[in-house]
Amino acid sequence: MGETAAIAGFAAGLRFEDIPEPVWRKALDHVIDALGCGLAGAGSTLSRQFLAVLAQEAGPGPCPVLGGAASLGPASAAFANAMAINALDFDDGLEEDGKGLGHPGATIIAAALSAAFLRPGSGRDFLTAVVAGYEVNARLIRAIQPGLARFRQVYGVCQHQGIGGAVAFGRLQDLDAAGMANALGFAGTLANLPSLRKYNWDSRPLVSFKDFVAPAAESAVRAVRLHQGGLTGAADVLDGDTGLWRMLGSDRYAPDLLTQGLGRSWSLDMATIKPWPTCRWMHCSLASLAALAQDHPLGAGNVARVTVHAAEGLLRDFMDARPLTMVDAQFSLPYAIAAMLHAIPPARWYDDGRLGDPALLALAARVEGEADAEADTQMREHRRPAGRVSLLLRDGRLLSPPLICYPPGSLRNPLPQDFVARKFLDNATPHLSPPQAQVGLAALQNLQDCPDVAQMMQRLIGQGARQEIVNPACQRPKAARSPYVPGL
């Protein structure tokens, strides 16, 4: 049996009873996290601009968009919801020994959310689909990892995620193994190009799509719909010397990673939760700052200079001290450090007018970078974005902690058990009142007992004020958010 057939059979045949409780509970954490990120991100400039473009092309449909701004067809809603989940760069990741491997939740959960509004399904059905999507996604990206030389030439952060999204959507559409394999053929060949090296690193602003989670979610749903329309996709799209790994630019393929132990060993513990709304490659340095803040009374007024010690390549791409857009800010260590030292709640880092705040920019200008030999080794040999910061305080003291190699929210550096719940409440309150957010969280925490996911999600998504869809040229309105900053 080839890899595509094995994956399709696993996805179509998985039952909730087959999934160990720690695995589905981990998946539930990521559902809660994704929805909170989506509710916070739905009001962002980026999300609203993309939704405005969608509104010009996509007709109304049965699938609501996070934030309550619209209800669209399943593919368009998956696109919009994936964009909202990823808009603040606060959504989950996937890591293997500190090496980042994408943003699975934005694609997989957005696709599953669309499916929930097309046919009745329980919370257990939903979680089974999400677990299947995460499992296939994690195995696929590990199986197609390129060598370091090829990685430096061409790479796509989330271009593979349409496969995991199609698994989740197809599972909730009750596809059998043959139908799942055909849908995966479409999902693979609809994947967008691996474009990490063309993100405008040398000519800001950075690309608005960032990691292209939204096109992956859209293609995931469209792939299943094309199959349901009686059309034929690529057969055995993952298999052999000409499989998806080759199409996505890799020079290596390890098919055993796709199939070995499938249904018996699980990959969800590789999925990570973010404490800050920035590119994950910055989080070791931000964690260093947060650790210093636990032992010293830090604030914007008593810091004279901040030095980031990280890999040379990371400093080359992440030290823009005057970001032009919210995407630029999500890849700016000076901006993130300034936001943390000013104690701005994470979900408010990119509020309207924030990027031009003179106090933030003044502090960002005092952040400098210094290449660190050990961090260079970690990045060069393991693609592990290690980092730390040192602070020169105005009283003359120099604080210089050790290098951090594994960011918070990962298997090697876990966050507190209640972190996901606190983060959800903080992220959801711009859209929901605090009591509504508490009720929504309680419902999500018991998703496995929910008889009708669409009904529950409709209450969560549709509550609160509906947002006006703005023209792409318009600015985002201000939104009040609750004060929670991890580590500061």
Image: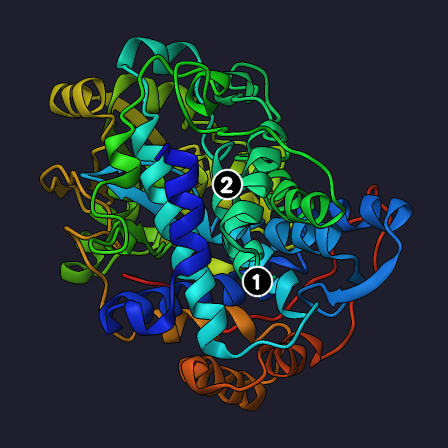
Q: Is residue 448 left or right of residue 20?
A: right
Q: Mark 2: which amino acid?
A: Ile
Earlier residue among tags 2 and 1:
2
Q: Residue at x 48, y 20 (%)?
A: 248
* Residue drawn at x 17%, y 58% as measured from the top left: 296
Q: Which residue is mark 1?
A: 174
Crowd band around label 1 with a 10 angstrom C-alpha radius: few (<14), some (14–19), many (20+):
some
Counting from the top left corner in percent of width and height, residue 188 is at 55, 31
Query: Which of 341 and 186 lies nearest the eye of the viewer?
Result: 186
What residue is drawn where x is 50% and y is 41%?
Answer: 163
User: In the picture shown, does residue 254 fall above or below 180?
Assistant: above
Is 147 left, or right, of 292 in this rendering? right
Q: Quadrant of the N terminus?
A: top left
Residue annotated with mark 2:
163
Q: How many marks?
A: 2
In the rendered structure, which amino acid carries the disc numbered 1?
Answer: Asp
Q: Horizontally, is 294 left or right of 487 in the view?
A: left
Front disc: 2 or 1: 1
The spot of residue 448 in percent (x, y) is: 41, 81
Q: Is residue 367 above or below residue 9?
A: above
Q: Position of residue 245 (x, y in %)?
A: 42, 22
Q: Secondary structure at mark 2?
A: helix
